[in-house]
Amino acid sequence: MKDKIKNPLDSLDHWEDDLLERYPEKNLKSKEEYRDYDTSDRAEGVKNFYRLNHQYQTYDFVSKKEKEFLAFNRKKMSLWDAVDFLNTLVDDSDPDIELDQFQHLLQTSESIRADGHEDWFVLTGFIHDLGKVLCLFGEPQWAVVGDTFPVGCEFSNKIVYPEFFDFNPDAKNPIYNTPLGIYSQNCGLDKVKMSWGHDEYLYQILKNYLPKPALYMIRYHSFYAQHREESYNHLMSEEDHELFKWVKKFNAYDLYSKAPTPPDSKALRPYYETLVAKYLPKTLNF
């Protein structure tokens, strides 16, 4: 928590290209080939995933899930218990890779670590997807993973597969189907309810333990309609815009560190055990 936060972006416009150039051995695809929802070998399954996600992620559904899960009375376990579970999970929403989640976490965090960033940034890369333990409690993947977006206002056409929102009842509700919906201009994302999933869940679990930039990375790393498309500037506060610089920087590591070759998890585990113990308690309430 006391680590000095460095300037996250010397050149945001060229950050993603620079990352790919510096780690060509980790990337068998060009920048344009990531998040390919049309020609990926997994495209049809991903499309079916988003059909369900967009149909059922309503304001009322999110409110119900928050009440159900944010009491954190499901299970008490260590972070490593959560990691062991994720080792069995392959993300149905990801068109890029079929490695288990533990390998993806290590790929992300090791790329961050290799660039010499603060240890809390490395830790964020390692734990950012641990909210996917929601699947452990019987939640379907469409309610756990995938791109996130605000509910309670109009769905942006920049969200992946926007046509599937035609089946979402909120899209026909006059209370929700305007750009601001139930919110006010530049109210700030802390006042906006996001679609339910692992991002918000993990943020709520960890919000008392990590620096604010790390918490933004965790809470909004799947919010592509904003950090990639900037479709919700009308809801963002000045603080949101400033902290989203960190979200954008993190996203380059999260997305472009994906590669079919797994890291040596056994050799790396002692380092991450020490890092986790520095910032987090021995057990967490899930």
Image (cartoon, rainbow, N blue to C red):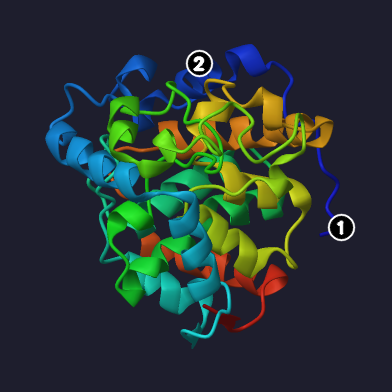
Give above or below for 247 relative to 216: above
Q: CB under 8 Å between callouts 1 and 2?
A: no
Three-letter residue code for mark 1:
Lys
Question: Which residue is tagged 1?
Answer: 2
> Is residue 56 shown above or below 47?
below
Residue name at image x 50 percent, y 15 percent: 17
Q: Residue at x 52, y 81 (%)?
A: 78
Name above or below for residue 16 compared with residue 73: above
- Residue 83 falls left or right of residue 277: left
Could you say where residue 7 lies in the image, as x and y percent from the top left? Answer: 80, 31
How far is the residue under mark 1 from the one under mark 2?
A: 31 Å
- The three-letter amino acid code for the residue at tag 2 is Asp
Determine the residue located farthest toward the top in the rendered image.
13
- Horizontal relation, residue 6 to residue 26: left or right: right
Identify the residue at image location x=47%, y=18%: 21
Q: Quadrant of the N terminus?
A: bottom right
